């Protein structure tokens, strides 16, 4: 690996990288898009020509330095070009979520004061017009897809290709101006502004400089030794920081090709046709694919099913070790090779993963079975931890050091420290400049020395030096003996069991941890049917002794795994109960996005919590429920409480010895 | 005969609709059509015309003779009396495929696609009437065949893009849900680049969302390609929203003809739909 110390002088903006790519690898593909059933492609030289034409067109329309250019649409080369063209003019691209409704868009349009908006199609144009509420705050609307646009008032509207044509025609007038503006860009000029989705309060505009983006792109490209020959599929929202880094930052830094699918519904087919070498997906994509594979295998013929089961068993045993380059016996290697020929290879091909060299997942916890399934097929799937404010990367897993429960080591150039209360702080060249027009939030998130609070609690594993994220910092507490209490960490482990729909772990300030369990009616109901267990209601099934037995075995397995962890072994579950009703957003027990509201639950089920800690075997309770039509009723039940086996914590073991 | 044609054509002055579409002269003129099956008279002396660029609906209760009318228009049924004039000329009796070559395409009330063939191949069949290369050339992929197929495929891909069915391009039609099959049928009809597109109950059996999609596609086709559309439909909301003019049939007779508003307020039409006491 050749060390690239600092970027060569002059390569301090995306347009500068574009110029370098167009000269040094002008004939290599830069963009591909499937249209009319055929992959159309643009080389770096052609891309530069298109982008410059668009930038000249923007100048002709009167785009000024410092203006914001909003971009709303699916991943298309033209939209990436619009972002770079805006940068060339000294303006700031602001990609927005295309599925946002008009009211959400109204806020960011007003907040960013975007003068120009690039829309993918008629639907987005309509939304922008609706979001303006008759104010006409947007001065120019540029659309990519002409369809249905003929009848609109075009006094402030243009088709993107027309803007380019106008730019080409006006090149003598504006070429010098454009080159001057490109030359003005330096490491401190704003590269992009991205709105965080904002689960609490209004979205905030995260301002990222060229330094943030290019330094991050350089460091992460070197970390995974990305080459100009990589192929990526751009299918995640353009407004998301990850897409900007992968499809613009890293693509321009290393010069690899960005492939845009034909449409949102063809993503899977296009994935297979492209066969990316570098790939990113949130856990739900991998989950969805695994489910569809499993369902199709259930319908397969007996021989195929046998082959699949046989070789997947082998893969589970040795596949992960092989992927990690760990020693595996010669016979197993041979058998795995055969499996690769018969099962793994064709399967990977079907999924579109044949050529993956580096794959990442992030965003939420991925189930260990799902993670290992892909890794055992020989796919180098890794995890990373990051956020918009860090220009994605905080930690990531190096090749060969991959595990489902860690998020890796600090990325190159990133400093990470753990605060007293367990919260993760970082400082890096990627640390954002500011929240746009929001100095209070900027100050409360980023301190004077540049450390940024993530809001997540975690710790470094002593043995491996890997970071593990356990919970949101505000949910982490202490138990009576002072050891760490991280409910979500244990709940996630429980929820990986298909039989458990929800779990609420209690224990903040207490002597030991307990849990409420919600069974998954589909999974447990199916299991009951197969085991001839009759039940008349959810409540009856939830209280069935055999269900308790099953849940207890899951909890004990989780306890075993929690006990491995010196810092968290206090979070083992000593007592549990299976709730007589499903936690429901209608009853205020969860948010609409299915996140448990701990405060409400502690209040509502206070009698049950008391029962968990006073040693009783069962508790009679009455719970108010809201029916779907809004009527209220009362649910009466006697809920059983059982004990679960726990293991001695390492500290206790040490004391005993 | 000639003066009469002139008269019919000039009677309809081109005009621009409020939403900016251009309605031209008469494209198809049906004059005194009567169709009998043995002793049953399915269509009784009906006359109406379809103008270039408009969306013309034919409505009526079950058994009113709407589909028969469409079959007369497409040349599948030959009426015992009356004349069909198309693009200013009286159409002689001819086979339906020859009628198709004149610029007529249709979809069917009961979907008529090739179930075992892919969506793409089904739509390609819509262009068969335009293919010039011989069977031998096509079989050997020789001579005109390759260039011709490329040209046709390009057109078909544009239609696939237009109707947003890229994701099912290679899927056998038999595996598709009903709403999508209807869309594929529309695609095949469009592939023939018709002057007049006839849709026989394009929304039958669809849910609200599918109906909205289909309505949008019909309007878009009319708007983007300027295709004249004749449609039979039961959903009154759809008919009133989409069409420029409506013909109402009942028991094989024409009982109303005019803009949706005129038709809505026509007492005879109200009676036919709501029922009326027969003395």
Image (tube, coloured by chain):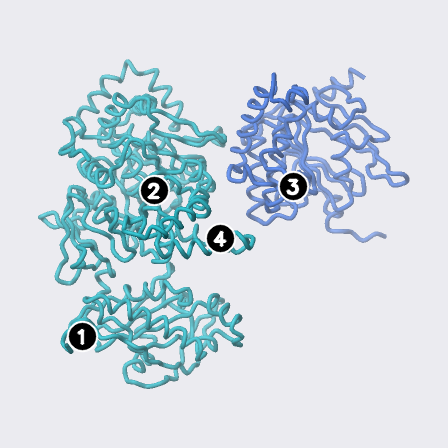
Residue A30 lies in quadrant: top left
Shown colour of chain B: blue
**Mark 1, residue position:** A653
**Mark 3, residue position:** B115
Residue reaching furthest front?
A: A331
Gap between marks 3 and 1 measured at Cα: 69 Å
Residue A421 point in image, percent of width and height? 15, 63
Residue B181 point in image, percent of width and height? 61, 42
Q: Answer few, some or many: residues within 10 Å of disc 4's Cα (few below 14, many 20 plus, some between 14 and 19).
A: some
Q: Which of disc 1 and disc 4 is earlier in sequence?
A: 4
Residue placed at 14% from the left, 77% from the top?
Answer: A657
| Secondary structure at numbered mark 4 | helix
| Secondary structure at numbered mark 2 | strand
Residue placed at 35% from the left, 41% from the top?
Answer: A356
* Res A635 visible: no
Residue A154 point in image, percent of width and height? 42, 27
**Mark 2, residue position:** A279
Gap between marks 2 and 4 measured at Cα: 28 Å
Residue placed at 17% from the left, 53% from the top?
Answer: A453
Residue A142 lies in quadrant: top left
Specify the subunit that label 1 lies on.
A
């Amino acid at each position: 690996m050749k060390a690239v110390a600092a970027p060569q002088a002059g390569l301090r903006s995306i347009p500068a990288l574009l110029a370098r790519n167009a000269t040094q690898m002008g004939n290599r593909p830069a963009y591909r898009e499937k249209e009319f059933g055929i992959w159309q492609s643009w080389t770096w030289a052609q891309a530069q020509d298109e982008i410059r034409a668009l930038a000249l067109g923007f100048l002709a329309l009167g785009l000024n330095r410092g203006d914001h250019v909003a971009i709303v649409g699916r991943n298309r080369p033209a939209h990436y070009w619009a972002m770079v063209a805006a940068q060339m003019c000294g303006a700031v691209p602001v990609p927005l979520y295309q599925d946002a409704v008009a009211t959400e868009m109204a806020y960011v349009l007003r907040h960013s004061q975007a003068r120009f908006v690039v829309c993918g199609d008629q639907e987005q144009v309509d939304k922008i017009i609706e979001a303006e509420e008759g104010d006409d705050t947007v001065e120019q609307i540029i659309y990519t897809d002409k369809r249905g646009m003929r009848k609109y008032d075009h006094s402030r509207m243009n088709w993107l290709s027309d803007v380019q044509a106008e730019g080409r025609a006006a090149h003598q007038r504006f070429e010098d101006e454009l080159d001057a503006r490109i030359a003005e860009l330096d490491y401190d000029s704003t590269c992009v502004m991205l709105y965080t989705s904002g689960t609490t309060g209004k979205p905030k505009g995260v301002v990222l400089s060229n330094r943030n983006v290019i330094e991050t792109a350089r460091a992460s490209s070197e970390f995974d030794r990305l080459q100009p020959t990589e192929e990526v599929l751009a299918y995640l929202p353009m407004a998301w920081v990850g897409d900007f880094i992968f499809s613009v930052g890293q693509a321009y830094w290393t010069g690899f090709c960005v492939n845009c699918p034909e449409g949102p519904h063809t993503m899977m087919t296009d994935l297979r046709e492209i066969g990316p070498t570098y790939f990113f997906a949130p856990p739900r994509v991998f989950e969805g694919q695994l489910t569809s594979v499993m369902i199709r295998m259930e319908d397969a013929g007996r021989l195929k099913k046998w082959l699949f089961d046989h070789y997947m068993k082998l893969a589970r045993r040795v596949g992960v070790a092989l992927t990690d380059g760990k020693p595996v016996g010669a016979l197993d290697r041979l058998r795995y090779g055969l499996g690769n020929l018969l099962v793994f290879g064709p399967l990977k091909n079907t999924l579109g993963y044949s050529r993956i060299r580096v794959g990442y997942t992030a965003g939420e916890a991925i189930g260990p079975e799902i993670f290992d399934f892909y890794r055992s097929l020989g796919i180098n799937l890794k995890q990373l931890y990051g956020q918009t404010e860090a220009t994605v990367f905080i930690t990531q897993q190096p090749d060969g050091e991959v595990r489902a429960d860690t998020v890796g080591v600090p990325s190159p150039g990133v400093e990470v420290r753990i605060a007293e209360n367990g919260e993760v702080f970082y400082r890096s060249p990627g640390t954002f400049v500011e929240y746009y027009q929001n100095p209070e939030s900027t100050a409360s998130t980023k301190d004077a020395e540049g450390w940024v609070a993530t809001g997540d609690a975690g710790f470094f594993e002593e043995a491996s030096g890997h970071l593990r994220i356990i919970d949101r910092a505000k949910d982490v507490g202490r138990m009576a003996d002072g050891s760490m209490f991280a409910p979500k960490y244990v709940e996630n482990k429980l929820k990986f069991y298909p039989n458990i729909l929800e779990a609420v772990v209690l224990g903040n300030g207490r002597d030991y941890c307990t849990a409420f369990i919600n069974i998954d009616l589909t999974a447990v109901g199916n299991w009951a049917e197969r085991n001839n267990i009759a039940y008349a209601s959810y409540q009856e099934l939830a209280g069935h002794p055999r269900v308790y037995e099953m849940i207890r075995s899951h909890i004990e397995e989780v306890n075993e795994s929690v006990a491995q962890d010196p810092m968290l072994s206090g979070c083992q579950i000593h007592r549990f109960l299976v709730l007589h009703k499903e936690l429901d957003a209608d009853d205020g027990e969860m948010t609409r996005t299915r996140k448990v509201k701990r405060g409400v639950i502690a209040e509502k089920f206070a009698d049950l919590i008391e029962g968990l800690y006073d040693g009783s075997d069962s508790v009679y309770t009455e719970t108010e429920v809201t029916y779907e039509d809004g009527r209220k009723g009362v649910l009466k039940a006697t809920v059983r409480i059982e004990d679960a086996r726990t293991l001695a914590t390492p500290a206790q073991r040490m004391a005993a010895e | 005969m000639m003066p009469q044609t002139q008269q019919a054509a000039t009677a309809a002055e081109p005009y621009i609709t409020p939403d900016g579409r251009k309605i031209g002269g008469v494209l198809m003129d049906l004059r005194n059509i009567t169709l009998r099956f043995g002793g049953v008279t399915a269509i009784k002396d009906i006359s109406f015309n379809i103008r270039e660029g408009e969306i013309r609906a034919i409505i009526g209760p079950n058994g009113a003779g709407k589909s028969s009318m469409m079959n007369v228009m497409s040349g599948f049924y030959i009426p015992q009396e009356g004349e069909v004039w198309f693009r200013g000329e009286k159409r002689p009796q001819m086979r339906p495929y020859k009628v198709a070559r004149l610029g007529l395409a249709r979809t069917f009330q009961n979907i008529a696609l090739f179930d075992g063939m892919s969506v793409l191949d089904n739509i390609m069949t819509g262009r068969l009437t335009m293919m010039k290369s011989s069977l031998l050339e096509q079989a050997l992929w020789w001579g005109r065949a390759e260039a011709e197929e490329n040209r046709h495929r390009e057109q078909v891909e544009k239609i696939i893009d237009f109707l947003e069915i890229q994701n099912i391009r290679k899927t056998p039609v038999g595996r598709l849900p009903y709403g999508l099959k209807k869309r594929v049928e529309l695609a095949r009809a469009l592939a023939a680049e018709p002057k007049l597109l006839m849709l026989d109950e394009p929304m039958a059996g669809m849910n609200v969302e599918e109906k909205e999609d289909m309505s949008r596609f019909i309007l878009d086709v009319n708007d983007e390609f300027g295709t004249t559309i004749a449609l039979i439909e039961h959903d009154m909301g759809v008919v009133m929203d989409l069409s420029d003019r409506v013909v109402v049939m009942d028991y094989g007779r024409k009982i109303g003809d005019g803009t949706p508003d005129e038709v809505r307020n026509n007492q005879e039409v109200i009676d036919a739909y709501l029922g009326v006491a027969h003395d």
